[in-house]
Amino acid sequence: MKGRLILENGMMFEGECFGYLKDSVGEVVFNTGMTGYQEILTDPSYYGQIVVMTYPLIGNYGINYDDVQSKNVKVKGFVVRETCHSPSNWRNEISFEAYLKEERIIGIKGIDTRYLAKVISREGALRGIITTAKLSYNDVKRLLDTNPTLNAVRTVTVREMEKINGKGKHVAIIDLGIKSNIIKSFKDRDFKITLMPAFSTCNEIMDVKPDCVFLSNGPGDPKEIYDVIDTVKALIGKIPIMGICLGHQIIALACGADTQKMK
């Protein structure tokens, strides 16, 4: 079905929609990876975003259910140049397009994704909508006048504490939107793991008696989760703290540094 990607700067890209054919709004970003589209789709760090893949062919090795990075797809939409209709890989369980339909995510193909990536590089991340409808200017403006990543961390974090046994050091993981592979990496090294909700308090974290605290990756602007920043401030000096991606940015903010969104 014919469709369009419309950006908040007024640019419009026409293509063919596939997957689950329901309009979707998100923050449009790009990824230059030649492989790993399945991991990108299910990475909680991409919650609220429409991801543009610059590699020209997506889906050539299909999808398997072992390599997902969370329980379901987290992106709001997927933009590609071309999809592969005949995936070839011994681990393939479902085609890329069928997987998006199963996960109720819209995609659009036939887009010059490398040109689109240059636009995003120049102007920074832009809100956009993938639609099969002929929307008026006012409709587009109204739909894009929202923040698709609002409350992103609160949406993707675990709801309750989870414990994973291990014989090594005890790490309290603050789940800001962690990828399953990071948890696997700790398990492979025999860490004892306590996975905790993002908005756990300093006292709640210290009560589990960890040897260290790990702040995970996750979506959104770190400055919007000031509760987590305050918790890290309270933890500093009491216990070793480490982080990756969003977690690293939160540590920086807690230490008095500043962050800004890159183009």
Image: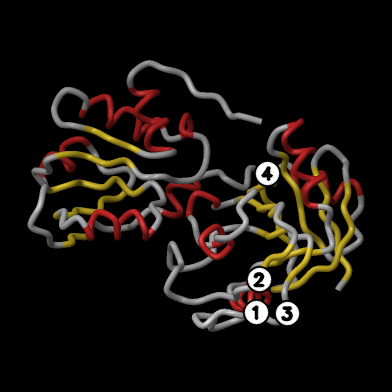
The residue that mark 3 highlights is: 85
Instruction: Please tell me in which quadrant of the rendered image residue 239 appears.
Output: top left
Camera-nearest residue between 46 and 115: 115
Image point (74%, 38%), residue name: 120
Q: Residue 59: which numbered mark, if any?
A: 2
The residue that mark 4 highlights is: 146
Q: Quadrant of the C terminus?
A: top right
Query: Who comes first in sequence, dot 2 or dot 3?
Result: 2
| SS label for mark 2 | loop
| SS label for mark 1 | loop
Instruction: Please tell me in which quadrant of the rendered image residue 192 appears.
Output: bottom left
Q: Where is residue 52 in the image (x, y as percent from the top left)?
A: 70, 52
Proximity of marks 2 and 3: CB atoms separated by less than 8 Å? yes
- Asked if residue 148 lies left or right of residue 233, the reply is right
Q: Residue 87: which numbered mark, if any?
A: 1
Image point (18%, 62%), residue name: 164
Between marks 2 and 3, how big is the CA–CA gap? Answer: 8 Å
Image point (34%, 54%), residue name: 182
Q: Which of marks 3 and 4 is in front?
A: 3
Proximity of marks 2 and 4: CB atoms separated by less than 8 Å? no
Query: Who comes first in sequence, dot 3 or dot 4?
Result: 3
Proximity of marks 2 and 1: CB atoms separated by less than 8 Å? yes
What kind of residue is marked 2? Answer: Gly
What kind of residue is marked 1? Answer: Pro
Image point (42%, 30%), residue name: 249
